[in-house]
Amino acid sequence: MLTKCLFPAAGYGTRFLPATKAMPKEMLPIVNKPLIQYGVEEAIEAGLTDIGFISGRGKRAIEDHFDISYELEHQIAGSSKEALLDDIRAIIDECTFSYTRQVEMKGLGHAILTGETLIGDNPFAVLLADDFCTNGTGVLKQMVGLFNEFQCSIVAIEEVPHEETQNYGVIEGEEIKEGLYRISSMVEKPAPEDAPTNLAIIGRYILTPDIFDIIREVAPGAGGEIQITDAINEQAKKTMVLGYKFKGKRFDCGSINGFVEATNYVFEGMNK
């Protein structure tokens, strides 16, 4: 049964310096809620309440956010501000949280392998909080429905401009029904002239546990890092792996432009 979700959150967030010098980028707020909380809420919507964080130095604020703050709650008890904590209190009550550290930054594949101790021999989801997705049913809930049907690894994909393929993992495959592709190959950050398609992987995955053994055998790829794209590419050679063109809107909150766009989008929605 699919109940586990990993959140790789060990990166330095250098594109947001100096804001991220002492604050995790995952704690940057979209209006009044941090990115990481939106991600956990999406996981809960999908029935994934065993939450694992791959953290690193300077990420203590994430642990503190998903914990009771007795002094704060005492200070605002009985006031109108107390209701502002209702959402995070509900999350704390509903989920179990586990943490492990990625001591060296060796890529997303390495981060996911670091989380093996939190996953064991179970299928699991991976959510990258940088990819902020909204509109209707959450992406993970859409993907869990597909996993229950196909029982295989699934990656979320979307079409991107061809000139941007060097920023993504890109898939090639056969469309077996509308918006669903059986992947034949994947490549990490191909130059536009080398990209097989413009179908890019975004930060939502459901993976079967055999991926851990595959990651262990994968050689460093783009940027000298252990790429999860390379590991899933090897998995696709042995068994079925699906790419799902999700329904919804994505903002790249790993970039300043995307972060501002997401903030404006949410703010406007709150004031309609």
Image: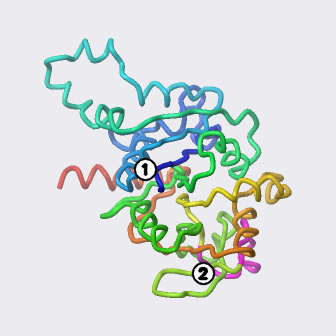
Measured along the vertical axis of the image, is residue 259 above or below residue 83? below
Q: Amino acid at mark 1?
A: Leu
Q: Is residue 164 left or right of residue 110?
A: left
Give yes or no for residue 103 being in the magenta stretch.
no
Whether the magenta-drawn stretch holds residue 195 is answered as: yes
Which badge, 1 or 2, is on the more N-terminal residue?
Answer: 1
What's the coloring here? rainbow
Q: Nearer the viewer, residue 46 or 38?
A: 46
Q: Where does label 2 land, which residue?
A: 182
The amino acid type found where label 2 is placed reads Arg
Residue at 66%, 33% in the rendered image: 101
The x, y position of residue 144, in whole percent, is 44, 63
Looking at the rendering, which quadrant does residue 141 occupy? bottom left
Residue drawn at x 57%, y 40% is: 16
- Magenta residues (range): 185-199
Please state which of residues 227 and 153 is positioned toward the viewer in this rendering.
153
| Quadrant of the rendered image containing residue 57 | top right
According to the picture, the residue beneath numbered tag 1 turns out to be 48
Crowding around mark 1 (Cα neighbors within 10 Å: few <14, some 14 to 19, many 20+) is many
